[in-house]
Image (cartoon, rainbow, N blue to C red):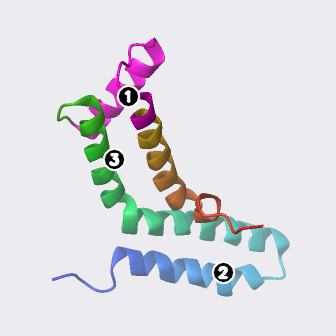
Amino acid sequence: MTERPTSTELVEAVREFLLNDVMNSPDKRMAFQARVAANVLGIVERELQQGAENEHLEHDRLVALLGHEGDLDDLRAELATAIRSGDYGGDRTELLATLKLTALESLEIANPKYANPEPS
């Protein structure tokens, strides 16, 4: 049974407090700091919601790309080393698609507006 409130709900509540109450402070420095803190909490909230699933998906993509199982950090390091040294011998199209998808998933957590820009 999940205890309430959840971590995500707590982070959201603090973020909403900062955005709705503290940012309306007449002290401009305080309002700016509240905006920064609210943005950080937004990242934490999205990480709590999406982070584990994104890591699972990235792990599966790296296993498919490298052709063997391993710890996510080890697979990342192996791929980075192979790319850096010029020894990556796999399909470049698959590599680019994998890297792009991983970058987009990270960006959806860090700043969803950049990952899904509004059409101009």
Describe residue 2's horizontal placement relative to residue 42 as left or right: left
For residue 83, what is the image quadrant? Answer: top left
| Residue annotated with mark 1 | 91
Hey, which quadrant is residue 22 in on the image?
A: bottom right
Asked if residue 18 lies left or right of residue 5, the reply is right
Q: Position of residue 88 (x, y in %)?
A: 38, 19
Looking at the rendering, in which quadrant would you find the N terminus?
bottom left
Inspect the image, locate mark 3, and give the three-letter code of the amino acid beneath it.
Answer: Glu
- The residue closer to the viewer here, 25 or 10, is 10
Name the amino acid type tagged 2: Leu
Q: Position of residue 31 (x, y in %)?
A: 76, 74
Marked residue nearer the N-terminal end (2 or 1): 2
Give me the C-alpha separation between circle 2 and circle 1.
46 Å
State left or right for residue 42 relative to residue 47: right
Q: Is residue 103 above or below residue 90?
A: below
Select label 2 or label 1 by which is in front. Answer: 1
Q: Nearer the viewer, residue 41 or 62?
A: 62
Amino acid, disc 1: Asp
Residue at label 3?
A: 58
At 38% from the left and 69% from the top, the residue drawn is 49
Which label belongs to residue 5? none
Q: Residues within 10 Å of mark 1 (few under 14, many from 20)?
A: few
Q: CB under 8 Å between callouts 3 and 2?
A: no
Dot 2 crowding, Cα within 10 Å, few <14, some 14–19, many 20+: some
Q: Position of residue 74 (x, y in %)?
A: 28, 31
> Considering the numbered disc 1 on the image, is that residue within a helix, a strand or a loop?
loop
* Residue ID for mark 2: 19
Q: Nearer the viewer, residue 93 or 95?
A: 93
- Residue 44 in magenta stretch: no
> What kind of element bears circle 2?
helix
Q: Specify start and end residues of the magenta stretch as a single range.
A: 71-94
